[in-house]
Amino acid sequence: MKKQLAYEMTGSGAPVVLVHAFPLSKAMWAAQVQELSKSYRVITVDLPGFGLSLRQTEPSVAAMAHAVAALLDQLKISEPVFIGGLSMGGYVVMEFFRQFPKRVKALGFFSTRAGADSEEQKQKRRELAEKVRNEGVKVLADTMIPKLVGESTLKNLPQAGEQIRQMILAGNPLGTADALLAMAGRVDSSDLLKIIQVPVLILAGQEDKVIPATEAEIMQKQISKAEMHIFEKAGHMLNLEQSNHFNALLAQFLKKQS
Ligand code: MLT
């Protein structure tokens, strides 16, 4: 049965919240849950309209962030948390910080950007939302995989593409279309970067065709306590393409915060 916000919580210790990319689900964090739950309480969520979560009545990235905070309330987690997100997950994390700065101990911005969409991008998202509603999520699987996975990974680890395809195909077309409209409507978070005083881990892929690694550099320059790593030979889906490297960097960063 669908839930308000489906989640998985594994391990014990300081809470670590991970927010997935578009158009995937919490399943994308399986390798991180397995490794990090040895030392932390790892919480992964299905954003509204994805996986086992219900759709939002008025889809927005701000409402997604609000839903994550409501989940933490439900889990009685009042201490500040590490919260990290990849791409769309990063947009949600920025909003979470905007709305609930006191709930944040440290942040992770992975393959993401602070800026909002241009008018042209917004229009493209609206058209794609319509297409997904009419034709289903398969249109995304076909067009997005070559963009989401870096060229080197497509050659060296072809199963990563297949893994992503299965996650996309498991999606609900209506929830996926909602998320496209939510992303189109998100506000620019660039103004937030300068006021972030908590430590931030920024990770990006050299071969990312969705959000270029230059966006990571822009964020790093603005944030006072940012640590940045650019993955060579990785595209957008860093945590799936190079899970060991991703896990090691995240574990090292989290250890410094404890
Ligand atoms: C994602 O990977 O979450 C999306 O591609 C981000 C976006 O479309 O802006």
Image (cartoon, rainbow, N blue to C red):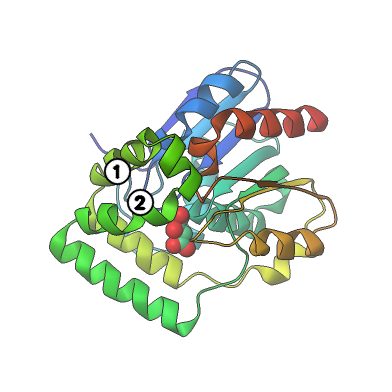
Pointers 1 and 2 in contact (C-beta within 8 Å): yes
Q: Amino acid at mark 1?
A: Arg
Beta carbon at label 2 within 8 Å of ligand 1 = no
Q: In what quadrant of the picture does the N terminus appear?
A: top left
Query: Residue tagged by mark 1?
Result: 165
User: Ligand 1 quadrant?
Assistant: bottom left
Q: Nearer the viewer, residue 225 or 154?
A: 154
Q: Secondary structure at mark 1?
A: helix
Instruction: Kindly identify the residue that appears in the image at 22 percent across and 71 percent down.
Output: 130
- Residue 222 in the image: state x and y as whole percent: 79, 64
Q: Which mark is residue 198?
A: none
In the image, taking residue 175 as reference, residue 226 lies left or right, namely right
Q: In what quadrant of the picture does the C terminus appear?
A: top right
Q: Residues within 10 Å of mark 2 (few under 14, many from 20)?
A: some
**Residue 52 visible at all:** no
Instruction: Kindly identify the residue that appears in the image at 52 percent across and 31 percent down.
Output: 43
Instruction: Kindly identify the residue that appears in the image at 49 percent across and 60 percent down.
Output: 209
Q: Nearer the viewer, residue 20 or 230?
A: 230
Q: Is residue 71 above or below residue 207?
A: above
- Residue 249 in the image: state x and y as whole percent: 70, 33
Q: Nearer the viewer, residue 131 or 60?
A: 131
Instruction: Kindly identify the residue that appears in the image at 32 percent across and 74 percent down.
Output: 126
Query: Residue tagged by mark 2?
Result: 145
| Quarter of the figure with residue 195 | bottom right
